[in-house]
Amino acid sequence: MESRLPLRLPPQPAWAVDHEGLTLKTREPQQFIDITERVLGCVRASGISDGTVTVQSMHTTAAILVNEHEPLLLDDLRRVLAGWAPAEAQYSHDDFERRTVNMAPGERPNGHAHARAMALQVSATLAVIDAELRTGRWQRIFLVELDGPRSREVAVTTAGLLGTGPCAGLAVDSAVPQLVEDSTCG
């Protein structure tokens, strides 16, 4: 009589999406806040090994920027944004006699901040590989405050394949069942 070893199907990767929120308090009217480590913490907590992470500002006067964290460069970027949309210029948005929509108690003139936001992005999506952010050598993730100081919210959404233990990320080339004895991770 022929003996058969039990068969096991290769594990199927599990797809997941994780949502986290970051709350920050800014201190300056215009400020670059490096949130890279906090985003990386969200990625690691998600359990996702390979996929993407999207970082999104929940505000119209705060943006997300991926760039170098170098003090002189950040000063240059502040100056460029201020030149792009000077705070002292006239903006119809700031004319509270004429403006009738989207008014809130304690509203302050911030047309310049909206104009500056037009030059930036509300979100950035980065690769996640082996549960780490895949960034270039100098790349960092910033929340760019354009109308501070304020309390700000950032949404972090990580989507991709869940890590599944010691075989996480192991590519399975075939749907053919493998012998249980041949199930090592490499």
Image: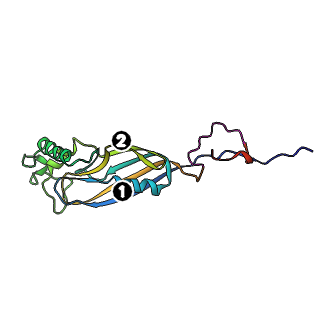
Residue 154 magenta-drawn?
no
**Nearest to N terminus: mark 1 or mark 2:** 1
Q: Which of 109 and 71 is in front in this view?
A: 71
Image quadrant where one finds the N terminus: top right
x and y, in percent, of residue 65 in the image: 28, 45
Tell me the residue at 72%/43% (across/down): 178
x and y, in percent, of residue 57 in the image: 30, 51
Image quadrant where one finds the C terminus: top right
Q: Which amino acid does label 2 sit on?
A: Gly
Helix, strand or loop for the magenta stretch, by majority: loop
x and y, in percent, of residue 9 in the image: 70, 45
Residue extent of the magenta highlight? 167-177
Tell me the residue at 16%/55% (across/down): 29
User: Which residue ends up furthest to the right in the rendered image?
Assistant: 1
Tell me the residue at 31%/47% (across/down): 140
x and y, in percent, of residue 174 in the image: 66, 37
Q: Is mark 2 on a helix, strand or loop?
A: loop
| Lateral position of residue 176 relative to residue 151, left or right | right
Q: Which amino acid does label 1 sit on?
A: Arg
Q: Which of 185 and 164 is in front in this view?
A: 185
Crowding near the residue tagged with mark 2, few <14, some 14–19, many ≥20 C-alpha atoms within 10 Å = few
Which residue in the structure is indicated by mark 1?
A: 38
Residue 172 magenta-drawn?
yes
Which residue in the structure is indicated by mark 2?
A: 136
Crowding near the residue tagged with mark 1, few <14, some 14–19, many ≥20 C-alpha atoms within 10 Å = few
